[in-house]
Image (cartoon, rainbow, N blue to C red):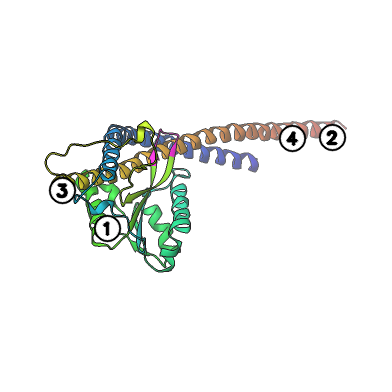
Amino acid sequence: MANLKEVRERIRSVKSTQQITKAMKMVAAAKLRKAQQAIVSMRPYSQKLNGMLSNILSNLEGDASTSFGEEREVKSAVLVVVTSNRGLCGAFNANIIKSVIAQIDEKYADVRKAGKLDLLFIGKKGYDFFRKRYTDCHIIDDYVNLFSDLSFDNVSKVAKKLMSDFEKGKYDAIDVAYGQFKNAAVQFNIVEQFLPVAKLDTEDKSDSKLKADYIFEPSKERLLNELVPSILQMQFQKFVLDTNASEHGARMTAMDKATENAEELLKELKINYNKARQEAITNEISEIVGGAAALEG
C-alpha cells in the first residue's frame, strides 16, 4: 500500500505541474499575439528601409558621404547580445548564446585578445552567462532591462549610443545577435552587422541587387544626415521586437510540449497505479484464501 501512496502523490504532483504549464502556455500565447502583430507589421517597412539605405550608400559619389558606411580596420568592436529576461522557453537563449560565442571565436578572436571587445546586453539571460565566463571583455549592462519598455523612444536610446560611439571611432564594428521570429514554432538565431552599414555587392547583377539611381531632394548631405540615423534606429527596433516575439513563441511551444509530456506521464503513472492496486488486491485475496484453507485444515 505504501507503493500505491507514492504513485498517488506522483500523479497529484504531475497534475499540478501540468496545470502550471497550461497556464504559462496561455499567457505566452496572449503575449505572442501582441508581439507578433508588432513585428509582422514593422518588418516589411524595416526591410525596405534597410535595402534603400544599403543602396543609397552604394551609390554615393562626390563629396556626399556618411560616417555610418565607413569601413575601417577592426581594432575595437562591440557585440550586442539580445536575449530574454526569463527562461522556460526551450533552447531559444542557448542558441543565441552559441551564435555569439561562434562569432567571437571566428571574427573577433584577435580583438578579444587585444582587450578591445565589448559586450552589450539586452535581456538577463545573455548577461548572466557572459559576465561570469568572459571576464576579459568589457561588460555593458546599462540596457539589460530594456524589455520593460519596448517603445521606439526607449529602444532608440541604445541605437543612438552605438551610432555615436561608432562615429567617434570608439568602435570599428558593431554586430547584433538576436532571435529572428518566423512563427510560434520556428525562430532563427541571427548575428547581423549593424555598423558599418553593409553596401550592395556591385558584382552581383541579379535584378534584386541592381543599383538604383536616386534623385535627391533636398541635397544629399542633408538627406543623409536625417535619413540614415532614422533608418538605423528603426533597424535596431526590429532586432528587439523580433527577439521579443521569438521569446514568447518559443515559450508557448515549450510549455505546450511540457503539457503533452505531462499527459503522457500521467497515462503511464495511472497504468502503474492500477497494476499496483490490482497486485495489492490479488495479494489480499490470496492471504484470505490461504487463511481459510488453513482453518479448514
Question: Label 3 crowding class (10 Å Cα cut-off): few <14, some 14-19, many 20+?
Answer: some
Does label 4 or label 2 sit earlier along the sequence?
4
| Residue for badge 3 | 221
Instruction: Name the residue type under label 4.
Output: Asn
Percent x, y of residue 25: 41, 35
Does the residue at mark 4 contact the one at mark 2 (Cβ under 8 Å)? no
Indicate which label's residue lies in the foreground, 3 or 1.
3
Which residue is painted at 27% across and 36% down in the image? 212
- Residue 191 seen from this side: yes
Which residue is painted at 24% across and 36% down in the image? 213
* Distance between mark 3 and mark 1 Cα atoms: 19 Å
Does label 4 or label 3 sit earlier along the sequence?
3
Percent x, y of residue 186: 45, 35
- Residue range in magenta is 180-187
Indicate which label's residue lies in the foreground, 4 or 3.
3
| Residue for badge 1 | 166
* Distance between mark 1 and mark 2 Cα atoms: 95 Å
Does label 1 or label 2 sit earlier along the sequence?
1
Outermost residue toward the right in this view:
297
Instruction: Name the residue type under label 2.
Output: Ala
Q: Examine the structure image and report whether residue 216 is included in the region drawn in magenta.
A: no
Labelled disc at residue 88: none
Instruction: Name the residue type under label 1.
Output: Phe
Q: Examine the structure image and report whether residue 184 is included in the region drawn in magenta.
A: yes
Does label 2 or label 3 sit earlier along the sequence?
3
* Distance between mark 2 and mark 3 Cα atoms: 108 Å
